[in-house]
Image: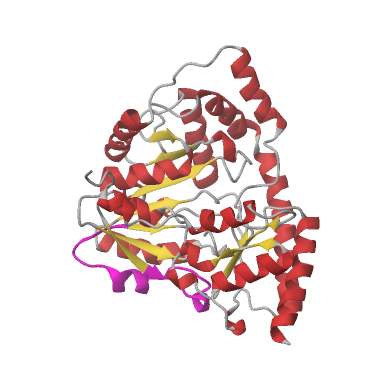
Amino acid sequence: MRNPLSDKITTIKPSGIRKFFDLVLEMKDVISLGVGEPDFDTPWHIREEGIYSLEKGRTFYTSNSGLKELKVEISNYLKRKQNLDYNPSDEVLVTVGGSEAIDLAFRAMLNPDDEVLIPQPSYVSYFPCAILAGAKPVIINLKVENNFKLTAKEVLENITDKTKMLVLPFPNNPTGAIMNKKDLEEIAKVVIEKDLFVLSDEIYSELTYSGKHTSIAEIEGMQERTILINGFSKSYAMTGWRLGYACGSKEIISQMTKIHQFAIMCAPTTSQYAAVEALKNGDEDVEMMRNSYNQRRRFLVDAFKRMNLSCFEPFGAFYVFPCIKEFGLTSEEFATKFLQEEKVALIPGTAFGDCGEGFLRISYAYSLDTLKIAMERLERFIKKLRS
């Protein structure tokens, strides 16, 4: 029998997050700080709108690009938050989570052998989605001494005549790093000079703890060069609703919609009605959750200082990325040993790229009580390693 599998797909490694998470499922009484999922329930008024849509029999397909009311609210949201103008009729596409939007953008914009600059450590989907689109991922290793920010110099050093797109994953998963307006302006100069496009993944835009989130699309000359990706999973605690969106030029969004049309048809109708309510009346919910995450963030940063464990202070998302190089263990060895001995699950930094070696990702999308117990166990564990 001939090989039933695609050569391309067999070369792609499974997600390092899921690989480690599978170990957790085999153990009892484990505290897991590994999954980037809010511990809050979706706010009731948002759930209620979803329930109401079902009660009213709104179980039909929406248009391929999404419910008109939702696209209008997305456009309104980006206008008031980032002062960006997107035409809801042809510059906004509603997707099945932000991850589908990333995949669609790559497939719609990249030709075989085009190069995509991907800063790492970063979300696990960029690299395989670039491969599946036939493009060549070019990795830029982010450095802790730069606060895990991407610099214009690093972008320039990695550009070739085949470079077409830059992925901008900020606020960053797993490091929690953010980029301010000045940082983005320097990047924008290079992007415009070298005639590149940007995929800006802003799924954690509402979870910024130091000033206001800035999108690179806000910078002059960049909106037409940027595909802005966002969604509802993190900000509104709507992970299971599977809803995201992409905004960009009509030319690009129309081709992304075409792929979406053939592969997906449309995002879940119930989720779209709930998302309209989230955008209209969810600002207070977002602020409450952000304040809670910020409290947890400060608790972890202080806990690491007490343990004398090196950790860059994050200002976005809900992750910390402590350094464990002093212990002479790989990230996977440390995480595995910690799980076995103390029953706390963390994610090895290498799940987010090779340059994540020597680091761990810890999610603080968990209750403060849970984090306190986990930190007590971590402190006990590293004391043993240091003795």
Asked if the magenta segment contains residue 158, the reply would be yes
Q: Which residue appears at 45% of the width and 38% of the height?
A: 245
Q: Is residue 315 visible?
A: yes
Frontmost residue, 127 versus 164:
127
Find residue 299 and report its horizontal and vertical position in percent. 75, 65
Q: Position of residue 227 (x, y in %)?
A: 37, 46
Q: How many marks?
A: 0
Camera-side residue: 291 or 340? 340
Q: Residue furthest front?
A: 1
Residue at 37% from the left image edge and 62% from the top image edge: 118
Left or right: 192 in relation to 47: left
Is any part of residue 312 visible from this angle? no
Q: Quadrant of the N terminus?
A: top left
In front: 217, or 114? 114
- The residue drawn where x is 55% and y is 66% is 348
Left or right of 111 on screen, residue 202:
right
In this rendering, position of residue 358 left or right of residue 313: left
Rendering quarter of residue 193: bottom left
Q: Which image quarter is the C terminus in?
A: bottom right
133 vs 178: above or below: above
Residue 116 on image: x %, y %: 30, 59
The residue depicted at 47 percent of the width and 61 percent of the height is 122
Colouring used for the render: secondary structure
Position of residue 300 relative to residue 41, above or below, is below
Q: Is residue 205 magenta?
A: no
The quadrant holding residue 276 is top right
Task: State the extent of the magenta-drawn residues as a range.
Answer: 140-165
* Residue furthest top as drawn: 56
